[in-house]
Image (tube, rainbow, N blue to C red):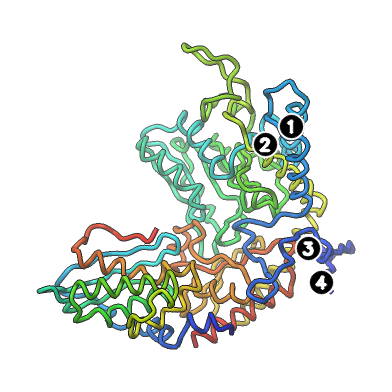
Amino acid sequence: MRSVRLRPGGGPTTTVFDVEKVREDFPILEQEIHGHPLVYLDNAASAQKPRQVIDAVARFDATDYSNVHRGVHSLSERATAAFERSRETIRRFLNAAEEREIIFVRGTTEAINLVTQTYGRSVLGFGDDIVISSMEHHSNIVPWQMLCHERGANLRVIPMNDDGELLLDEYEKLLGPHTKLVALVHVSNALGTVNPVATMIEMAHRHGIPVLLDGAQAVPHLGVDVRSLDCDFYAFSGHKLFGPSGIGVLYGKAELLQKMPPYQGGGEMIAAVTFEKTFFKDIPHKFEAGTPNITGTVGLGAAIDYVASVGIERSALYEHELLVYATERVQEIPEIRLIGTAKNKISVLSFVIDGVHAHDVGTILDRHGVAVRVGHHCAQPVMQRFKVPATVRASFAFYNTKEEVDALVDGIHKVIEVFS
Amino acid sequence: MNSELRDLYQEVIVDHSKRPRNFRKLASGHSAEGYNPLCGDRVTVYVDAANDIVRDVSFEGCGCAISTASASVMTEVVKGKSRSEARKLFDTFHAMVTKGPQAIEGRDVGKLGVFAGVSEFPSRVKCAVLAWHTFEAALKGEDAVPVSTE
């Protein structure tokens, strides 16, 4: 019996989340690893795909595939329609005002690099500041650092407390006339912290500073409304949202996108080309040079439809149950120290085991069928902040179960046994 | 526990990882730094070699059980060896952890044999060879060049 009864907020509403039924949609989960049922707890690295996504991609490739925005033939028209339908699906998913505010990219990393190379290059000068947080993924550090070095600008970093929560008083002090952009992670991949982004955007806007949110870890767990957040840019990847890898999205407010120069030059993004001058297309195509990941966009559209059919509010409640249960179970083990204990968290459990390196934990857990991520999670400054070389990270999706949490805990006991 | 795990985390390996031997700096000689960017493991190997003999060798650093134990056992087995003997040992060790014990059949690996189980864990080979690559760099006197297993 794996379905869980949930009473959100203790109120009279009762929701049942039928996890068994959800699991049936994910064929990859029905396998054994080293003689044990697969327990996939590496969802923050990449989530698995439901049959609905796998089938939509296969069907599109088998029946409708062609290049987009180029041909007059039927397949090209069908492929273009499917491609643009995905753009509309994403607009709705983010509650963006217009479809042209949705730009297809390879993933969150490319989305951030696009903003760095276009918006960043237009506004950042000597002595200016870019503000990021101390819990950024490398993808929201390195592009800004490279640009700051090039321009003689400064990268300012919002500190956090020992629970992994950003210090808003310190943040306020960093904002000023030289701040050109705040680039902030919505949800931390290494700690699970959900940052108070609405407040932080409001604080930046009071100084007239635009805000980019890295939403890679947020979109699978939270309903995101870019208009109510009033963020200026929002970036996410398909593969963490049960869709394909190699496809992602940059949302930007139309007024900002229109002012920005193109990212890459090439086909698709032009209106007219001579050897003397090129006229660029309007947004979003101005930022989409070359043949895009056409099948990937169709898969991402199908993934968003799937997440909507499961219901993100119901799945978020269920994931919270899992997080609470996993946190309790793991804390029963005295050798464990949790890294990331913010009050507002998504279902990520990062921890270290006293006297055992994370890589050894990962190897032993794998031999018991449990897949976790071990290492620095592309967030080395977070590791430095908590003075650990690496952590073990179990990240849960709505298809995980309490029995799988138990398998993790059993595996941890095996690890401790080996090193005792 | 399954037998492959038992082979990997043998008592000798766990012991060396918890109580690494020759875990210190050397006052004289060369040193080199090794780094595995995948997991963040770092090791510094110090070598005092004269007249073609590895007179003393030690290490410092922070890593997983496999990389720490490998560094520790390495310092024990290469001490007193000639440069060419030490290199030969590395070749044998490398073949054993990458291709499996059958690849070095007939060759005497002595204490290094405890690492034979690493070959069943391809993602852990880098952990086992990090200290050896770093040792080789220190032996060549390549102080300034950080060794990477990538």
Mark 1 and mark 2 residues within 8 Å of each other at the beta carbon: yes
Amino acid found under the numbered disc labelled 4:
Arg
| Image side of residue B55 versus residue A178, left or right | left
Report whether residue A199 is seen.
no
x, y (%) of residue B148? Answer: 35, 60
Query: Disc 2 vs disc 3: which is toward the camera?
Result: 2
According to the image, label 2 marks what residue? A294
Q: Do we see residue B134 in this rendering?
A: yes
Q: Chain of mark 1?
A: A
Give the spatial CA distance, label 4 vs label 2.
38 Å
Nearer to us of marks 4 and 1 is 1
Q: Residue at x 74, y 37 (%)?
A: A86
Whole-Å distance between the Cαs marked 3 and 1? 30 Å
- In the image: residue B150, left or right of residue B90: right
First reached walking from the N terminus: tag 4 or tag 3: 4
Q: Provide the residue designation for mark 1.
A: A79
